[in-house]
Image (tube, rainbow, N blue to C red):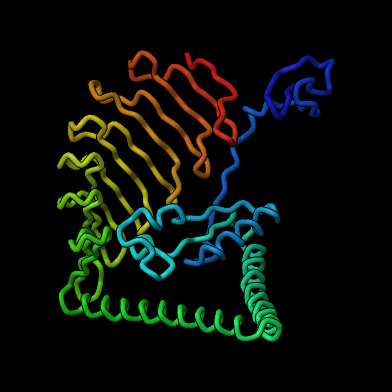
């Protein structure tokens, strides 16, 4: 008998785990087959408020979800640029388990409708407050409207500038740190993006390059320690990240390789810099590490296996020989 929570094995004379106070089961949690989930995109957006609301609703309904691209929006060149999403990464994709697709669509539709109704309610409340509070509230509203108009004019001005730059010069330049020197460059051919270059530490030297094919990210390279030598390589397929190779000792060979499926981390391996053999491998399910294999004597064969729970805590270790 096994505890489904802590994994401790007990004799058949017990029915309850004395530590966790939960009923015992016949099968060890570590022997449970991993759950494979096929995530599909149900909605794309650049609205952070909508994303936060969607997370809460999906979680409350017990729907497993993945937000693709949310954490990358402000890490890549250009940021959100007033559009709600990064032009390199594209809109944030809300993905759910394929079997919950229709239910999730209906829930997100209700969120959109609910937002519209909420705005109407707020407007009605504002009207009542204006009537009660008089000119002071009117002044605040006019200031707010003026601010919104100013933002809109700025966004439209940027869009016009961006359009002209794309078609007239083939390159759009951005000054991200406001020092009057461009440090991010978007290259276009016939209005289609082909390359992005960025100086991330603002030392006047490019240290990040992304290359596009037919408008989609194809591959990229970067100098992450800013020593003038490329040490990281990115590969994409249809705009989605598939692999990252990292050189940790400046020998122009990767010592860490990460593999991605549908943009989600699925496997990570560590390579010995001398023998060039894999000495450690981690397996991820839905982006969470669940298995790890280690070659302790560096002979090219894994010696131990470690099983992790859904919180990436080790629950079982056993030898492989």
**Residue at screen point 70% across, 56% down:** 61
Question: In the image, is 137 to the left or to the right of 74?
Answer: right
Coordinates of residue 240 in the picture (x, y in percent): 38, 55
Q: Is residue 285 above or below residue 193?
A: above
- Is residue 59 depicted above or below 189 in this figure? above
Q: Residue at x 40, y 70 (%)?
A: 83
Seen from the viewer's position, the closer of residues 205 and 310 is 205
Q: Quadrant of residue 270?
A: top left
Residue 224, horizontal then vertical, whole percent = 25, 42
Q: Is residue 157 above or below residue 296?
A: below
Q: Is residue 283 left or right of residue 239?
A: right
Residue plotted at (61% across, 86% down) = 135
Give the residue drawn at x 63%, y 28%: 31
Q: Name the quadrant containing residue 77.
A: bottom left
* Image spot of residue 12 (x, y percent): 81, 16
In this rendering, would 260 be left or right of 193? Answer: right
């Amino acid at each position: 008998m096994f505890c489904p929570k802590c994994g401790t094995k007990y004799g058949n004379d017990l029915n309850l785990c004395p530590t966790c106070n939960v009923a015992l089961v016949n099968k060890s949690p570590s022997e449970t087959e991993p759950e494979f989930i096929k995530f599909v995109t149900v909605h794309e957006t650049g609205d952070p408020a909508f994303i936060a609301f969607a997370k809460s609703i999906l979680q409350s309904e017990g729907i497993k979800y993945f937000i693709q691209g949310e954490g990358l929006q402000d890490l890549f060149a250009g940021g959100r640029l007033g559009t709600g999403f990064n032009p390199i990464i594209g809109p944030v994709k809300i993905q759910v388990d394929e079997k919950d697709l229709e239910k999730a669509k209906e829930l997100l539709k209700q969120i959109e409708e609910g937002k519209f109704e909420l705005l109407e309610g707020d407007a009605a409340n504002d009207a009542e407050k204006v009537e009660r509070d008089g000119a002071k509230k009117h002044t605040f509203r006019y200031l707010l409207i003026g601010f919104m108009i100013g933002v809109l004019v700025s966004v439209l001005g940027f869009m016009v500038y961006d359009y002209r730059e794309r078609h007239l010069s083939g390159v759009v330049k951005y000054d991200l740190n406001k020092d009057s020197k461009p440090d991010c460059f978007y290259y276009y051919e016939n209005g289609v993006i082909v390359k992005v270059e960025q100086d991330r530490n603002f030392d006047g030297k490019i240290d990040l390059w992304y290359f596009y094919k037919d408008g989609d990210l194809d591959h990229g390279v970067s100098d992450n320690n800013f020593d003038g030598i490329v040490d990281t390589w990115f590969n994409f397929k249809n705009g989605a990240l598939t692999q990252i190779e990292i050189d940790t000792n400046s020998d122009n060979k990767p010592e860490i390789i990460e593999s991605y499926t549908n943009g989600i981390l699925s496997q990570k391996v560590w390579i010995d810099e001398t023998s060039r053999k894999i000495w450690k491998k981690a397996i991820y399910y839905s982006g969470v590490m669940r298995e790890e294999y280690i070659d302790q004597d560096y002979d090219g064969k894994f010696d131990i296996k470690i099983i992790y729970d859904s919180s990436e805590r080790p629950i079982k270790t056993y030898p492989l020989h």
